[in-house]
Image (cartoon, rainbow, N blue to C red):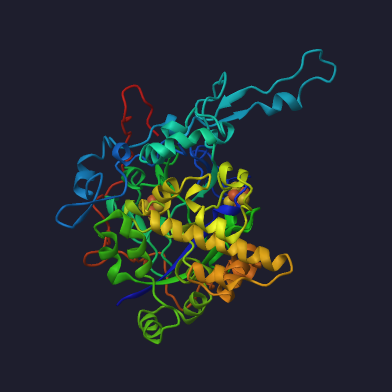
Amino acid sequence: MKVMAQIAMVMNLDKCIGCHTCSVTCKQAWTNREGTEYMWFNNVETRPGVGYPRRWEDQVENKGGWVHKANGKLVPRQGGRLKGLANIFANPNLPEMSDYYEPWTYEYEKLLSAPKDSSALPVARPKSQMTGEHINAPEWGPNWDDDLGGSLETMQDDPVIAASGAEVKAQIENAFMFYLPRICEHCLNPTCVSVCPSGAMYKRSEDGIVLVDEDKCRGWRMCVSGCPYKKVYFNHTTGKAEKCTLCYPRLEIGEPTVCSETCVGRLRYLGVLLYDADRVGEAAATERDEDLYEAQRQILLDPRDPEVIEGALAEGVPRSYIEAAQESPIYKLIHEYQVALPLHPEYRTLPMVWYVPPLSPIVDEVTASGNDGEDGKILLTAISRMRIPLEYLASLLAGGNLAVTEKTLRRLAAMRSYMRDIHLGGEGNEEIAAAVGMTGEEIEAMYRLLAIAKYEDRYVIPNAHPEIERSLDDFRCSLDGTGGVGMGGPGFSGNKVMVELLPRRPGGTSV
Ligand code: SF4
Ligand code: SF4
């Protein structure tokens, strides 16, 4: 057992109001520079929808993540580093600018400098931030589905719907929707690191944050295509890859990420997980997609187990990390209450941003029949008839595992019903808690964390430690070593090479 620490996030989708504050504050902090106009390290998608970049979940086209071979081995879907080297001048798997959008601004100065006595109404025309030319009418943007909410215009292009059954497709007519905020997953088994030919991508050994070493990056963009979540971006001005840093300078002084700090819905949680690094490969190579959720949960270690504490100390994990792991809201939501699920575990990168799935109204016929939709018995039996189809959520968050998704939603529904009785002046009904394998006490603790947790309960972050040696020459990737996917060493490239990559489709524009 090799105990390592990872800073992870959980987002409670039931509370996301789609305000995009997280995206805007992240952009102000990190990507408000030339060359980064189209980048959104944090974006919020309307689901169903095609997301940003468009159809990022279509791995047949995008070739992101890992493929499980018949011999049980995992290989990057786009091929390994050698194949990457062969393709450095023409990576065929890159998204195009139109898959993201052409960033634009408006001619605000025309509004500010318009003469007061002019009879013509001043207008601020949109202008491309790529070419400086006027754009007649923007046709796509990073949250375009938001503006189309409820229409069928793009929903049928949603890869998750395409993979779902006929019943889900038919239910689109009911216009179910919810918001999905996304950042880099800071995966335990990241393809972006494994496919980088120059060894520029690395996973920090002390807290698992995945970063780009800008000095080593040669702009080959294998990481862009290798990441199945499309969370590495190419800066067309500097010729380097860029990505979410999990706001590590803030975490190092004990502060949460900007997106968490400013989240209006207070739905983000940050904390430490301890995991067994020796079992990462085995978990990622679990045969069936449906079993990946459980395999991933099983490599998380109990931070109160004396053997785990001893192992962590032996690996140099500071005591404050262990103490933070013992109070971690992430461990509670994923492992103790089991109400958080990983985004697309079937990509096999072992993502470290998990989601509490949203409850939704029960379809009309249940409530129309005169039943109380909040009644525990009705709620628990009607999960499969909620407006957001179970199958859709299972495809998004559980590798298609309906049973796991239903169990998660049943726990959330039980919490809602149990707490309603208390808020109406009654007593919590232990039968409701027992029906989902919990006690009333556990349900109340889960409610406190999910509904009314204070700042210090949502973000349990250990300060960086001066005793962890980290000089600029001594960055260590936690994935280096036998069997690891990290590169280690200087990588294949020696020179600074800026390459112009070809567009994927004829007539397309490269990013
Ligand atoms: S989500 Fe982040 S860590 Fe995972 S493969 Fe993509 S860029 Fe790498
Ligand atoms: S700030 Fe919070 S509530 Fe608003 S869109 Fe982002 S995650 Fe959702």
Q: Of 43 and 162, which appears nearest the observer? A: 162
Quarter of the picture holding the N terminus? bottom left
Quarter assignment of residue 468: bottom left
Q: Residue at x 42, y 52 (%)?
A: 397
Rendered location of residue 246, percent (x, y): 50, 58
Rendered location of residue 111, percent (x, y): 74, 25
Quarter of the picture holding the C terminus? top left
Rendered location of residue 31, percent (x, y): 54, 45
Left or right of 118 in this view: 423: left
The answer to whether residue 486 is visible is no
Q: Residue at x 69, y 68 (%)?
A: 422
Whether 64 is drawn above or below 447: the answer is above
The answer to whether residue 323 is visible is yes
Q: Residue at x 63, y 28 (%)?
A: 106
Q: Residue at x 58, y 67 (%)?
A: 459
Whether 429 is drawn above or below 17: the answer is below
Whether 104 is drawn above or below 88: the answer is above
